[in-house]
Amino acid sequence: MTEATKIANQASSRDPRVGLRSVAALRQLVEQLEVIQVQNARNMGWSWQEIAAELNVSKQAVHKKHAGRRFLGRGK
Amino acid sequence: MFERFTQAAREVVVHAQEEARDLRHGYIGTEHLLLALLREPSSVAMRALDRLGIERDAVRSDVVRLVGEGPPNRLGERDAEVLRSIGIDLDEVRRRLEEAFGPGALERRDRVRHGWRRRKRCESIADDIPFTGHIPFTPRAKKVLELSLREARQLGHGYIGTEHILLGLVREREGMAARILAQRGASDQRVRNVVIDELARGGGLPGRSA
């Protein structure tokens, strides 16, 4: 990291706009990571129960989010 | 089979992908094929749709009303910048994910959410299409492409043009495109009549430019 960006980052670290956006971006990154990892676990034969345990959520929660939901409410 | 598609019909397939991407939908459905048909100015399908009073803008808002738009799903430059401010290097995250899960891993976010996508893959015309990137066709959209081939055969045409895609779309009644068309007064039968009429006006057997 160059000195300039370091200074820029330090300067912006108390800027709420940057801080809040970083939260939003991180949340989105987490969502995407979750999809990738759950998919991978399912491909490797993991049960919803096992996935839920690692994610620290209930089996129902992970199943509802990743198995039941159809994209944008398609399907019937 | 895809080699029998006319240039305009091929463009429809390519544009359908763009329509899906534009709406940030993770699939190419019949509605995207319809929107793509409405982008081919002098095609038989476009002329028929025009006569039926079907406008692209209206269809697009129907689609948005019925299925919505996808969330902004790419982490962009701005996101990378703010993530850097809390010590996360998005490029590095992306690099590692691609290393483990293949190119574009971070961008393909809706994979597990499609009920239909877990179904067994079926052999289809859509599998022959070389340039749809990673956006998959829905089973119905694949079916429409199959039906367009059948429509062409029934009409005794040796090619698949935009008109056959349109006929395939209305034949697949449960599809989003057929439902939108029907709601706008363009029933299967009306579409069929107008298409046949357009073909006749075009002077018997239409050229491959259709």
Image (cartoon, rainbow, N blue to C red):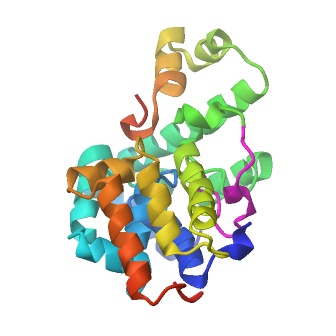
Instruction: Let me know if residue B129 is in the magenta part.
Output: yes
Q: Is residue B153 visible?
A: yes
Question: Residue at position x 49%, y 38% from top?
Answer: A31
| Residue at x 70%, y 48% (from the top left corner) | B97
**Residue at the image point whose x is 48% and y is 52% from the top:** B29
**B40 to the left or right of A35:** left
Return the x and y of residue A50 as percentages of the image width and height.
67, 12
Whether residue B76 is visible, yes or no, is no
Query: Is B161 or B88 nearer to us in this picture?
Result: B161
- Can you say whether B14 is above or below B150 in the image? below
Left or right: B76 as drawn, with respect to B62: right
- In percent of width and height, residue B210 lies at 51, 84
Mark count: 0
The residue lying toward the viewer, choosing from B177 and B202, is B202
Q: For residue B45, which quarter of the picture?
A: bottom left
* Residue B57, quarter of the rendered image: bottom left
Q: Which residues are magenta?
A: B121-136
Q: Position of residue B83 (x, y in %)?
A: 47, 54
Of the pair A48 and A16, the residue shown nearer to us: A48
- Tell me what residue is drawn at x 35 percent, y 54 percent: B188
